[in-house]
Amino acid sequence: MNEEFPPEYGPKWSDQRVERMLGALVCAVVGLLLAMIVTVFVRAWPSFSHNGLAWFGPGGSVDEQLNAIFLSGQGGAEYIYTFHGWPLIWSTILITGGAVLIALFSALFVAVFIVEFAPEWMSNVLQPVVRFLASVPSVIYGLLGVLVLVPFIGNHLVSEEQKASVAGVISLSGYSLLAAIVVLTTMIAPLMVSIFTDGLRAVKPGWLEGSLALGVNRWRTTWKIGVRTARPAIVAGTVLASARAIGEAVMLAMISGSVGFAPNPADGLIFIFEPSRPLAPTIVKNIDQLSSPPANATLFAIAAVLLFSATLFSLTGYVARRSMRKYGTA
Amino acid sequence: MLLLKEDKAAVEGSATWALSDRVGLAICWALGLLFCAIAVAIVAYLFVKGISYLDLSMLTTPASAGFSQAESGGFSDALLGTLIVAVLAISIALPTGVATAIWLVEYGRPAALARITESTIEAIAGIPSIVLALFGTVIFSSTALGFLSRSSEGVVFGRSFFAASAMLSLVALPLVVASTREGLNSIPRHVREASYAVGKTKAATVRRILLPSSRPQVATGAMLGLGRIIGDTAIIIVLLGATQNFAPVEDAPFPLDYLRGAGTTLTNFVYEASPTGNLNQPEKAYAAAFVLLLMVLALNGAVDVVHRRARKVGTWSS
């Protein structure tokens, strides 16, 4: 190697080699994702193939089924795969859906506030607050939920008559849909706010000025022009937050109640106090059962459902964000 | 929306608006204040609880079995475990993420592969960490990777600091990639052309010009990634701990025996010490959560400092 030239000019760091090395690394990352998808679905296959579409349907107690599946893998007996996951799926839908709806509403208002209406000092306070709320580990949210919110709901919001009315079916101790939705909303709303503010900031000022020049007030201009133009960002933020919400395992394992029970809205308002357990926490709670082959397949089947829906959400978000580029600045 | 704040106030206040519009603005204020109140409540509550329960000896004594909270030691192993996991995982995620970002911005051919890579990174960002953890149990229990964790008589245990860190690096990877890309994209084209014009190769330009000037964004990405790594619990529960102490393997030299063994981190400790976990010692859970929150706050502060410093240095003129 010639002393006068730094090493990156030598053949070792030639452009072609660097490009090929980086390309190989990128291919490895892509390959890893593909391997993950294939592995999860291959492992999940026995559970899906034994149950067919009934996997997603109701029927019997999920917790008993999970237990039977686990035990059948311990002895030499034939494996049992029967699993009807509806209570878990329904709980996931209720908790994720509820949290995403509330978070969407509040995040939209907060984002509009930060970008357009808050006084300078207020938006300077709100932005770090949003960033902080987004970065608090989920286990801390879970801990505060389980030690503060759950006892509060159990002691003050649920009346004794309500507890007695469902005493034979399920116990209302505060571990509830309500607690899960409240905490999950706090976790995902900041994510939405940060994506929404980016979208709102990218709206071309000329469009807003045009509306203002026509005498439309600032509030209506923001909602009719700003928010509408930023729609792709709103879609993107919402689906990305949904992907996060659907995969939230540890916090929900702590406060959702960990009972394979499907809260029934037909019961009236009491159903928001009923415990349940979504899909992701089911994996956390049953993680010791991985050594039993049929339980392993069942847990991977749950993971496959999560993987499929989360990937669907995040790719939708990606497509929505790409379409933002047609507005130029984003 | 480029209207300056003072211009907006000069244009119109809310006094002339219809009632429904003013109600909307009130909702804005209410929700904004609610966000602040939640953040203040979380910090204040954990500070009060943390300071009253945290004993400095907890940071230096490992957890031990005991009947009451006074007997069961501290969480020094968890604290060290968090640091080990953070260092290992970010040292995988940072080079991989920066390299991926460089390839995407500076090379990016064939275009189809670039698009696939972009969506791969997006997909990885959306994958629940519990799914990553389950995938980890498959690859790290395979005999080929058995040397990374404890194994006895051909059965690979599959739980180790290596396994957990490798999967946690995937959690941080998308953040590093996104932030580095942002940095590289903000450098105008003429800077690269100037570098080529004095005879630098593309690789040399990346190393000598582009990476140094996007250092703030790389650092931001790394710190955001670190925040996610130390905050993740699902991967730790599945791939690292079932224990509150280090469990080094016997047949390896010093650092490797611990890294190949199982262990714990602060998040896992908080989970297990909460009323739903196996230990049920809420006072220590508060103390550990307080330490964890301090780490998160420190990382947030560091991101702010980097941002402010980068803004002071200024951007490229175009």
Image (tube, coloured by chain):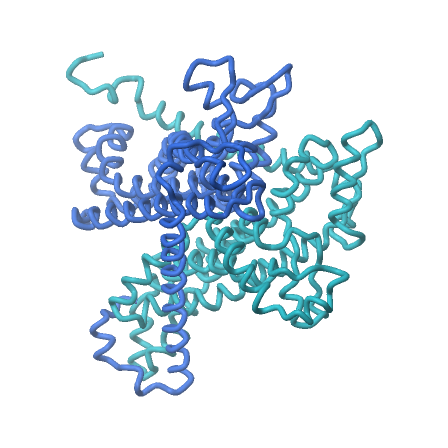
* Any part of residue B115 in sight: no
Image spot of residue B100 (x, y percent):
40, 35
| Chain coloured cyan | A
Quarter holding the N terminus of chain B is bottom left
In percent of width and height, residue A69 lies at 77, 39
For this rendering, which residue is in front, A330 or A247? A247
Q: Identify the residue at horizontal 17%, vertical 49% (top origin).
A: B314
What shade does chain B have? blue
Give left or right: position of B84 versus A46. left
In this rendered view, identify the residue nearer to me: A203 or B215.
B215
- Asked if one can make out residue A317 in the rendered structure from this viewpoint, the answer is yes
In front here: A302 or A199? A302
| Residue B316 x/y as whole percent | 19, 47
Q: Residue at x 66, y 62 (%)?
A: A172
The relative height of residue B41 versus residue B260 in the rendered view (above or below) is below
Residue for point 55% across, 41% down: B279
